[in-house]
Image (cartoon, helix red, strand yellow):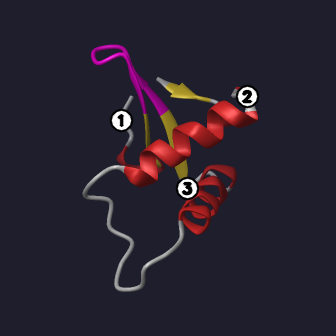
Amino acid sequence: MIIPWQEIDTDTLNNLIESFVLREGTDYGEHERSLEQKVADVKRQLQHGEAVLVWSELHETVNIMPRGQFHD
């Protein structure tokens, strides 16, 4: 289920994004980027509809994924 990011408290959203970008295996390419830059990139992707917040009932977790990879 997609969670509208606009309905999430700002601090909670920032914590979700930080947790997402700090996960092991997240690749940002050849150039190292700061945590703030990574968070800003993900936030921009959410704002532009390129990424979505997804609730997994099975795992009871929230994830961020590209919109094209989300299947209802």
Q: Secondary structure at mark 1?
A: loop
Residue 9 is marked as 2
Residue 18 horizontal side relative to residue 32, left or right: right
Q: State how far apart marks 3 and 1 are (Cα).
A: 14 Å
Residue 29 locus on image (x, y percent): 35, 79
Residue 2 horizontal side relative to residue 65, left or right: right
Residue at 49 percent across and 75 percent down: it is 33
Rendered image quadrant of residue 63: top left
Look at the numbered discs 2 and 3 and tell me whether their residues touch, using CB distance below 8 Å: no
Residue closest to the eye, 26 or 44: 26
Mark 1 is on which residue type?
A: His
Residue closest to the eye, 59 or 51: 59
Residue 65, visible in the rendered structure = no
Residue at 66 percent across and 59 percent down: it is 44
Q: State how far apart marks 1 and 2 are (Cα).
A: 25 Å
- The mark closer to the camera, 2 or 3, is 2
For mark 3, what is the residue? 50
Q: Residues within 10 Å of mark 2 (few under 14, many from 20)?
A: few
Q: Residues within 10 Å of mark 1 (few under 14, many from 20)?
A: few
* Part of the protein shown in magenta: 54-62
- Can you name the residue that lies furthest to the bottom here? 30
Residue 70 locus on image (x, y percent): 39, 40
Rendered image quadrant of residue 36: bottom right
The mark that comes first in sequence, 2 or 3, is: 2
Residue 71 is marked as 1
